[in-house]
Amino acid sequence: MNLAAMSTEPHRRIVVKRCAERREADLYALVLSARGISSVIFHEAGDYCLAVASEDAERATDEITAYNCENDDQSPPSKRFRSTPPNIEFLLSYWAILLFFFAAARNNALSIDWLGIGSAQAGLIRAGEWWRLITALFLHESGLHLLSNLAFGTLFLLLLSQVLGPGMAALAVIAGGAAGNALDILVRPASHTVIGASTAIFAGVGLLSALRYNWRPGRRLFPTMREIAPIGGGIMLLAFLGFGGEQTDVLAHVFGFGSGLIIGFVLAALDRLWSANSHAQAWCAWTAGGIAAVAWLCAILVRQ
């Protein structure tokens, strides 16, 4: 970056931008440099200040405003979604939970018919057993069914947890999976039954697609191919992974993906740095765990 020397006297230098991080200030300095405006960066009161000569201040402010408007009509890059390091504990929890319920169902642990009390049977759900929309996400009918969901779920949940953080990713996936099951049940006969984490996994695919979607109304009439690519990629994954197999519930996968898209668009519109908010992560993790625990508690108590 070519930053021209500038007088350090206060009356010759005007701060046009304060940034929380150095790399953000560097980015704006590069934007100004591309427009022929020299700038300096200095640290003051916990912020990185970007300053220009007084005669360039108005033009520099206009260039920064134009840059922000051009880039997704968002506030500075620090507010965008950032990736966090892989959360191994989150993935281990995912594996442990699905393996526990698979083993419990195979061995009738605690003398409970786990598949019988937890599967999403349309007729029983319509009769009021709402918890089956959630408990069905934890059950699998065979080892192959379980392993496929463990494999694909590990990949997509890892990516999602890097964007949303583990707590919010868990809550969003459970919500999307339950919503997908609910929509599936609405159009199925009373005898229809579904189990498996795949509805929640495809909700995670929808969430990722929506969170990486880069177009905002008002920027231009229609999105470009680059902006719409995440949605197209998600649909391709849905078609490739969600439409195969004789016993595959395609509608549940489609509804899960759609539910994830909607939740993802809502989170993207709120424009928060979710992964860095430790309080939100803890609250979401406890909420997700509480929802699952209450659902299973209802399933066990009602069938006793």
Image (spheres, rainbow, N blue to C red):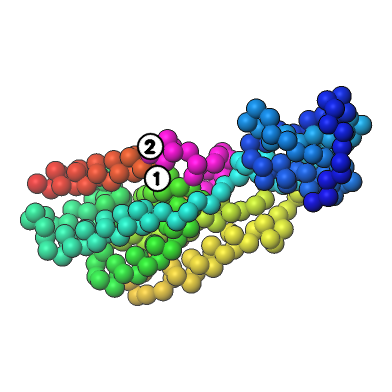
Q: At which x and y percent is residue 298?
A: 20, 43
Q: Nearer the viewer, residue 158 or 216?
A: 158
Is 265 contained in the magenta span? yes
Q: Is residue 284 visible?
A: yes
Is 60 contained in the magenta span? no
Q: Residue pushed farthest top? A: 11
Q: At which x and y percent is residue 48?
A: 69, 36
Q: At which x and y percent is residue 245?
A: 37, 75
- Residue at image position (38%, 56%) is 88
Horizontal arrangement in the rendering, residue 2 relative to residue 145 (left or right): right
Check disc 2 and give the amino acid type: Trp
Q: Mark 1 = which residue?
A: 167
User: How would you rate the neighbour count of disc 2 (Cα within 10 Å): few for under 14, some for 14-19, many for 20 or more?
Assistant: some
- Residue at image position (70%, 55%) is 223
Horizontal arrangement in the rendering, residue 2 relative to residue 42 (left or right): right
Number of marks in picture: 2
Q: Mark 2 = which residue?
A: 283
Under circle 1, the secondary element is helix
Under circle 2, the secondary element is helix
Question: In the image, is residue 140 above or below residue 160?
Answer: below
Q: Nearer the viewer, residue 33 or 170?
A: 33
Residue 120, picture quadrant: bottom left
Span highlighted in magenta in the image? 262-283
Question: In the image, is residue 292 above or below residue 112?
Answer: above
Between the residue at mark 2 and the residue at mark 1, the CA separation in whole angstroms equals: 7 Å
Horizontal arrangement in the rendering, residue 168 relative to residue 232 (left or right): left
Check contact, mark 2 vs mark 1: CB within 8 A. Answer: yes
